[in-house]
């Protein structure tokens, strides 16, 4: 019987950082190039991870993008701080962190590509469904706590906060971004107040 080395029997050691490397490179690539440029060969070059290793973990680009959205963009499946204002503030902080972070353009690309590519809709439907359901849970808890009237459209608060943050950050000119970022905590608090006050006011009409 031929001798076999210990290393050969065990095979190549698993790289514990491989998923992070792929997620970072994939989020960056998709943010810049969208679905059209989201190619595994390009991703392999940019991540330093071989195509075979990528395909061992993700069956195709659709599955990979679905995982990237959870790993590198805005994501929460449940938020319960015990207080509606705290819940909304945490949602706002998470979205601000995403939009001002290194992959802030990722969701913008996804929203654009969902219009044109069924593969992107397939990859992102579950992601958005999770966020919507989490937002509904926040709204239902607000109703149960009595923080908003029983007639209120409580989930409208999430839409107001997400939309307000996106508009504020995306439309701010580059030369004003430093000042904008310094004022984001105050903007967040004002937006959360406006969302709660607005939902309460609209339900009383």
Image (spheres, helix red, strand yellow):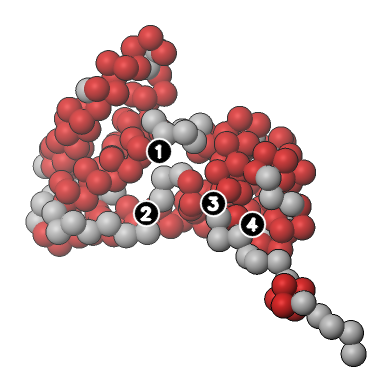
Evaluate whether residue 149 shows in this view.
no
Dot placed on the residue nearer the N-terminal end, 3 or 2: 3
Dot placed on the residue nearer the N-terminal end, 1 or 3: 3
Residue located beneath label 3 in the image: 20
Dot placed on the residue nearer the N-terminal end, 2 or 4: 4
Gap between marks 3 and 2, in whole Å? 19 Å
Evaluate whether residue 63 shows in this view.
yes
Q: Which mark is residue 76?
A: 2
Dot placed on the residue nearer the N-terminal end, 3 or 4: 3
Dot placed on the residue nearer the N-terminal end, 4 or 1: 4
Q: What's the residue at 64%, 57% (across, down)?
A: 63
Of badges 3 and 4, nearer the viewer stands 3
Dot 2 falls on a residue whose secondary structure is loop
Q: Which mark is residue 158?
A: none
**Image x and y of residue 97, in percent:** 35, 37
Q: What's the residue at 53%, 37% (across, down)?
A: 106
Gap between marks 2 and 4, in whole Å? 19 Å
Gap between marks 2 and 1, in whole Å? 12 Å
Q: Which mark is residue 63?
A: 4
């Amino acid at each position: 019987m031929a001798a076999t080395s210990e290393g050969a029997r065990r095979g190549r050691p698993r790289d514990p950082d491989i998923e992070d490397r792929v997620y970072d490179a994939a989020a960056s690539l998709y943010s810049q190039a969208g679905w059209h440029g989201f190619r595994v060969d390009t991703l392999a070059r940019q991540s330093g991870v071989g195509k075979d290793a990528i395909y061992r973990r993700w069956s195709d680009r659709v599955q990979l993008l679905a995982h990237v959205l959870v790993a590198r963009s805005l994501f929460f499946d449940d938020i319960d701080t015990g207080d509606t204002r705290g819940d909304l503030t945490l949602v706002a902080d998470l979205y601000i962190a995403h939009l001002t972070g290194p992959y802030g353009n990722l969701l913008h690309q996804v929203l654009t590509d969902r219009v044109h590519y069924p593969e992107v809709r397939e990859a992102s439907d579950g992601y958005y469904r999770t966020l919507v359901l989490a937002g509904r849970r926040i709204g239902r808890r607000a109703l149960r706590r009595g923080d908003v009237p029983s007639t209120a459209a409580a989930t409208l608060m999430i839409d107001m906060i997400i939309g307000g943050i996106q508009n504020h950050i995306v439309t701010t000119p580059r030369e004003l971004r430093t000042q904008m970022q310094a004022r984001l905590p105050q903007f967040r608090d004002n937006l959360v107040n406006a969302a709660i006050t607005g939902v309460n006011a609209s339900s009383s009409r």
